[in-house]
Image: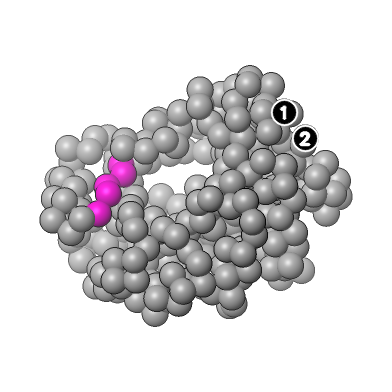
C-alpha cells in the first residue's frame, strides 16, 4: 500500500487494551482516566481479522501495544494466532516490563520475535514516582527474562525531557551497553499541542518516511498519531477503513485532541 505522498505503508501498530498497571506521569493523570467499556473494546477475533486483512493489503510488520498489552487475558494465545499469519515478517510487542518475567518465555514460544520495554530511569525511587507505584526490580527481571527467551534485539524505550544527556538517560544508556540492549530515546510528546521529535536511535516521529497505521482498542484505524483522523472498522468495514486511513494519511502530524497515549498505543 502507498499513501498519497508515495510512502509505502507496511506497519500496523495494534492496541489490544486501554488498561495499564502503571500510571506514568506523562501518560495519564494521577486519578486515572475513563476506561473504555468492555463492549467497546475489540474482541481478539475482531483484531485478528483486522490484522489478516491488513497483511493481505501489504502490511508485513505488526506491533502489539496497549495500554499495557500483558494485562489482557489470553495475550499469549493471541500472539500465537497472529504469528501464524503468512506474510508477517516482523512481529513485536511494546511493554512496560512489569509482567514480563512471567510472560517472556511463553511469548517467545508463541512466535513473538522481539520486544520493546519502557525504562526511563534506573533510580528505584524515581521510577516509583514516575510510574506512581511501579517496582523497578520487576522491570529489570523482565528484561533479563526477555534476553533469556531470545526476544532479541531487546530495545529499551527511554522517555526524556530535553536531552539524552540527562543523568537518567545516561544511566540507561550505560546499562543498555553493558547488557547488550538497544537504547532508544523518545522526547516527551504532547498530543494536544503537537509536540514531537524524531526518536533518537529509532524511526518514530520522522514524518517523511512514516510507514504506519494504528488500530485502537475500540476499533479505529488511525493514519497518524498526531491527527484526529480515524476510521471505524465496525462502521466502515475493515478494508474500507484501512483504505480510507491510507488515502487520507497526512503528510505531517499536527495535533491530536481526541486520544490519549494509553489508548492509542504510542
Which residue corresponds to the image point at 18% horizontal and 41% vertical from the top-left?
Answer: 166
Q: Is residue 183 magenta?
A: yes
Q: Which residues are magenta?
A: 181-185
Under tag 1, what secondary structure? Answer: loop
Q: Nearer the viewer, residue 44 or 261?
A: 44
Which quarter of the figure has residue 139? Answer: bottom left
Which residue corresponds to the image point at 63% horizontal and 20% vertical from the top-left?
Answer: 5
Give coordinates of residue 90: x percent, y percent. Answer: 50, 51
Under tag 2, what secondary structure? Answer: helix
Residue 246's place in the image compared with 138, above or below, is above
- Left or right of 122: which side holds 51? right
Q: Are marks 1 and 2 in contact (CB under 8 Å)?
A: yes
Q: Which residue is mark 2?
A: 244
- Left or right of 243: which side holds 108? left
Quadrant into which the N terminus falls: top right
Give coordinates of residue 250: x percent, y percent. Answer: 64, 25
- The reply to whether residue 261 is in sight is no
Q: Which residue is mark 1?
A: 248
Main structural element of the magenta stretch: helix, strand or loop? strand
Amino acid at each position: 500500500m502507498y499513501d498519497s505522498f508515495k510512502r509505502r505503508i507496511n506497519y500496523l501498530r495494534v492496541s489490544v487494551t486501554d488498561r495499564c498497571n502503571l500510571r506514568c506521569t506523562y501518560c495519564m493523570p494521577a486519578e486515572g482516566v475513563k476506561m473504555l467499556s468492555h463492549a467497546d473494546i475489540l474482541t481478539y477475533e475482531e483484531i485478528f481479522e483486522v490484522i489478516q486483512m491488513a497483511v493481505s493489503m501489504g502490511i508485513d510488520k505488526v506491533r502489539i501495544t496497549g495500554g499495557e498489552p500483558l494485562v489482557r487475558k489470553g495475550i499469549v494465545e493471541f500472539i500465537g494466532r497472529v504469528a501464524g499469519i503468512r506474510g508477517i515478517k516482523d512481529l513485536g510487542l511494546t511493554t512496560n516490563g512489569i509482567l514480563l518475567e512471567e510472560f517472556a518465555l511463553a511469548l517467545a514460544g508463541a512466535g513473538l520475535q522481539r520486544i520493546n520495554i519502557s525504562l526511563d530511569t534506573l533510580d528505584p525511587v524515581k521510577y516509583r514516582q514516575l510510574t506512581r507505584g511501579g517496582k523497578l526490580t520487576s522491570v529489570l527481571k523482565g528484561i533479563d527474562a526477555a534476553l533469556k527467551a531470545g526476544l532479541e534485539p531487546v530495545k529499551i524505550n527511554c522517555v526524556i525531557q530535553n536531552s539524552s544527556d540527562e543523568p537518567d538517560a545516561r544511566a540507561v544508556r550505560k546499562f543498555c551497553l553493558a547488557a547488550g540492549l538497544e537504547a532508544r530515546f523518545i522526547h516527551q510528546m504532547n498530543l494536544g499541542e503537537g509536540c514531537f521529535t524524531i526518536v533518537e536511535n529509532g524511526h518514530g516521529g520522522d514524518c517523511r518516511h512514516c510507514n504506519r497505521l494504528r488500530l485502537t482498542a475500540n476499533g479505529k484505524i488511525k493514519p497518524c498519531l498526531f491527527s484526529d483522523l480515524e476510521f471505524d472498522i465496525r462502521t466502515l468495514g475493515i478494508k474500507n477503513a484501512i483504505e480510507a486511513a491510507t488515502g487520507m494519511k497526512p503528510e505531517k502530524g499536527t495535533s491530536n485532541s481526541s486520544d490519549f497515549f494509553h489508548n492509542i498505543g504510542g
